[in-house]
Amino acid sequence: MPAFHCTRTRRSPFIGGILLLALMVACGVPPSRAADLNTPEDVIRLLVRANAEKDIATLSRYMVHDTDVVGYTIGGRKYVGWPAFERVMKDEFDAVARLEIPITELKVWQKGDVAWFSMELDYIRYVGTGAGQSRMSLPLRETGVLERRDGRWMLHVWHESSQRGPALKAVNPGGTASAQKISTSSETPDFSGEWEIEEEDKSYRAMLDKAGNGTYTHKGGILKTTGFANRLWQGTWQQPENDREGGFEVLLSEDAKEAKGIWWYSRVGDHKNIPPREHGGTYTWKRLTPPPAH
């Protein structure tokens, strides 16, 4: 939220995200060469396998790179073009220890050089190691369109949404689940207290109320929470002292003590045509006061 640099583009968000390409199908296809991918379903399964194996190169090869291609995911997030999506996926791969993605339903239709699909699946993320490892299951619904270009099937557009709230479990080193806690998308935590916000070149403090609204100690900053779902915390910020404002999106840790994500500008003085999420940076929020007891 500090000084504005028009040449600086924001770096990737956390999650991933929470974050979260929904083409997660059970790994039912063995490693394939491009020449072996004869059907749209082959490509979907290859993309899913690449996702589970954190293979950005294969994802890139079989997803179109048109500048206006659009993808939608949970939490109301929108990706335009390959670079925006690639940043999110790299952050997600860095954030998780491993992924499991069982598919529960998949249907594919084709007409000429166009195919479309629908599916339901569980996107299961393992974060951390040892006794502190946690398991989050996100039941998702997916739809998308593929196009055959120069003989190769490519994913063109996609959309995903949640079936229900995520199931959270702590997993011991032996792989068995212990106490389970169910968190629904309607459950919003108590954000009240003091937070330290760390950017690459500075840090400052924020004082928030229960709803996640408050102030911070940089340029008379004002924070407002606009949404929370599946630990994805979204909001806006204003800095009256230097006449600028923007938005933020962070992923709250399961213990509600830390959040990591991105911020961006929406206005700087009279400049109001700043592309959303394009100019900004990354930061980390840390609670300085214990989370309120429930």
Image: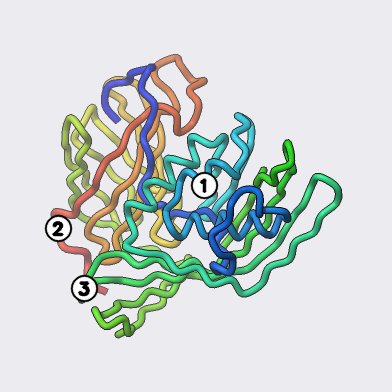
Instruction: Name the residue rendered at 38%, 43% in the picture.
Output: 13
Q: Which residue is mark 3?
A: 130
Q: Amino acid at mark 2?
A: Thr
Going from N to C along the chain, the mark reached first, 2 or 1, is 1
Q: Amino acid at mark 3?
A: Gly
Pair 2/3: label in front? 3
Distance between mark 2 and mark 3 Cα atoms:
27 Å
Count of numbered circles on the image: 3
What residue is pinned by disc 2?
289
Where residue 266 sits, quadrant-wise, is top left
In the picture, measured across the screen, residue 228 lies left or right of residue 259, that is right
Circle 2 or circle 1, nearest the eye: 1
Front one among 81 and 43: 43
Q: Is residue 235 left or right of residue 191?
A: right
- How many neighbours does mark 3 have within 10 angstroms: few (below 14), some (14-19), or many (20 or more)? few
What secondary structure is found at the residue carrying circle 1?
A: helix
- Please name the residue shown 24% across and 55% down the image: 258
Q: Write down the residue under mark 1.
A: 58
**In the image, what residue type sits under mark 1?**
Thr
| Most distant residue in the left direction | 288
Q: Say above or below: 38 vs 281.
A: below
Tell me the SS state at disc 2.
loop
Q: Quadrant of the C terminus?
A: bottom left
